[in-house]
Amino acid sequence: MNELTNRLALPLLHVAQSHKEMVHNEALMLIDLLLHGCVAAVGQDVPPAAATVGQCWIVGAAPTGAWAGQAGQIAGMTEGGWRFVLPREGMRLWWSAGETTAEFRGGQWRYGEVRARRILIDGMAVVGQQQAAIAAPGGGTTRDEEARSAVAAILSALRAHGLIAG
């Protein structure tokens, strides 16, 4: 009987189980690969020639060699060879080469996306939910072309950044 934990699929020990240390060590190895995880590369199909124990990768869509059949999984090098972990919804890893995160969401890996309801800096909200569009200046009898041009440029920049609707 090989039962696994619900979230990370770690192996569980059972009463009167022989070789408990093997199951326990496997669970510790998986925790070591995933807890505050960091990957060297994402979407890589070919295993690296000189992997160091403890390094991890997100396997690409068409893996070859020792990674064949492990598409989309996390490959970690251990003293005993490659270990593979199926990603779970919401799993997030740091991608060191890309200096960003890789998050498993909706059945696929997403890279460098930030999702938030608002952004705080020193407790002060600096970016919140997108607001309604602001009309560009127009009409009127007195015109100040420089002011209109500046306002139009500001609105354009805010739209380009997604802070206001177009």
Image: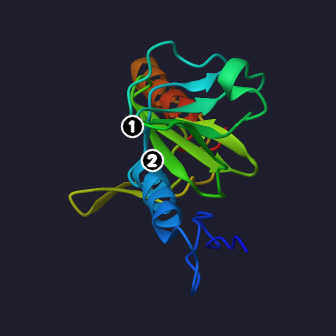
Q: Is residue 159 left or right of residue 150?
A: right
Residue that sits furthest to the left in the current view: 122
**Residue 117 visible to an observer of this rendering:** no
Q: Secondary structure at mark 2?
A: helix
Residue 153 versus residue 105: which sits nearer the camera?
A: 105
Figure coloring: rainbow
Amino acid beneath label 1: Gly
Task: Locate residue 87, reporting x and y percent.
Answer: 64, 50
Residue 108 versus residue 17: which sits nearer the camera?
A: 17
| Residue sitting at x 42%, y 36% | 79
**Crowd class of label 1 (few under 14; some 14 to 19; many from 20; radius 10 Å):** some
State the image quarter where residue 42 is shown.
Answer: top right
Above or below for 63 versus 29? above
Task: Locate residue 69, reporting x and y percent.
Answer: 79, 32
Residue picked out by circle 2: 33
Q: Which labelled disc corresponds to residue 94?
A: none
Residue 117 versus residue 30: which sits nearer the camera?
A: 30
State the image quarter where residue 150 is shown.
Answer: top left
Q: Earlier in the sequence, mark 2 or mark 1?
A: 2
Amino acid beneath label 2: Leu
**Residue 17 visible to an observer of this rendering:** yes
| Residue sitting at x 64%, y 16% | 46
Q: Quadrant of the N terminus?
A: bottom right
Residue picked out by circle 1: 54
**Crowd class of label 2 (few under 14; some 14 to 19; many from 20; radius 10 Å):** many
Contact between labelled residues 1 and 2, with CB atoms less than 8 Å apart:
yes
Above or below for 3 versus 85? below
